Image (cartoon, rainbow, N blue to C red):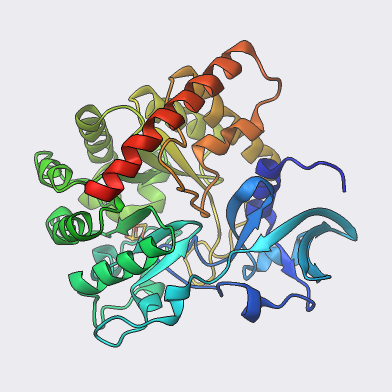
Amino acid sequence: MEPINPGKLKLELFCRGIKIDPSCEMDKDGRGIMKVRAGLGSGLEMILPDDLYANIPVLEPFVQDTPFKLIHRGGKYFVCRGNAELAEARLAGRPQWYGRNTSKGRPMTQVGSMQGTTLGFYPTRVCGFWEMTPRVNCRFCATGINVSNDALPTVDEIVEVCQAAKAEGTTFCHFNVGYYGGKALEVILPFVEAVKKRTKLLVGVQAPPQKDLSKYDSVINAGADHFSFCYEFHNPKVFAEVCPGKQKHLTQQAFFDALEYTTQKMGKGRNSGEIIAGIEPIEDTFAGIDYITGVGAFPTICVFRPVIGTDLEKSPSPDYQDMLKVYRRMYEACRDNSIPTGIAPNIKTSLVVLPYEGKYFRENTTLADFAYDAKLAVMRSLFLVYFRAKMLFG
Ligand code: SF4
């Protein structure tokens, strides 16, 4: 096999998906496909070379045209393009806690799920945008299809899942809340407080922006380590068209205000602005990357996935060559703004190409790249001690 660029392979698989050959033993070796939250987790959890976690589309109709196939041979898995084996890969295995129940008798997989090495929760009622008449959900979103309001998990159950996952090496959990009539932070606060106090896991929160910015202080004081703000599109017209609820009830400016407020409070590289690439013009995505990194946050860029059942299910998957340009820009913007990336240990989210994976997209390695790499390597070593202590003592 020729040496392969794992980052570019991950990106092309996001854009084109993969077919699963009948030789693969998915039930035995894999985690199974779980439909969670906004829908990006609807694919196959794989581990590519260099330990890159990736949730690869397998169900969407565009996958019919993919040149990629996963085969199983001699006890190993290979990603093939046509008949050529490109790279050995692994299926992300089922954690042991996937087979356990909470103290209330509920399967733990109904409470949380792994996305790469991180633990994701959607612990509250379905996003309010799905419950309005007419509904004003974001048009790419599958939350209203995937999330049920029946028997929401309790704080104790969430803590139990965190404890079980931490015992198997998880370091970070992520809470996602949809629109909650301006009360998203109040609703998520007890979960953050309990998880921080009782498990010491690192905790991230993704919630709609709050107009009263002082509400962030209580969640920061409860120990939240990270906030992500999904404003999705930098182009205001595309934002309004594709995210009608966010436009009407929140506004794009509210996302900017909350991102800037929390970044000023928590420091550079702690929080993220989340955008989707592949719907708005690429120049707008570049402008979004420049804005996010310019305020000291890191960009989380999702490759648009036309998830089955969503309003945009018939849209095409993004062009790989365009996405290469996007992730190259992501890398350069993080480097030029000295954004620390990949510092916290074992946070390998499978849903996106992570900022620290941006190094796979640079064209020629320059002195500025070497300097940035060196700085990140030093920060990783120094902060490892800090994070270990934080996960032991809080
Ligand atoms: S805010 Fe938009 S993306 Fe988030 S859950 Fe609601 S509809 Fe989905």
Residue 356 relative to residue 363: left or right: left
Looking at the image, the residue that sits furthest to the right is 83
* Nearer to the camera, 94 or 239: 94
- For ligand 1, which image quadrant applies? bottom left
Residue 251: x and y in percent read 25, 43
Picture layout, residue 162 above or below residue 299: below
Q: Please say whether residue 142 is visible from this viewpoint.
A: no
Residue 264: x and y in percent read 22, 27
Residue 212: x and y in percent read 10, 42
Residue at 27%, 71% in the rendered image? 160
Residue 254 relative to residue 360: left or right: left
Identify the image quadrant of residue 295: top left
Residue 259: x and y in percent read 27, 36
Looking at the image, the residue that sits furthest to the top is 367
Residue 378 relative to residue 87: left or right: left
Residue 139 relative to residue 212: left or right: right
* Nearer to the camera, 284 or 237: 284
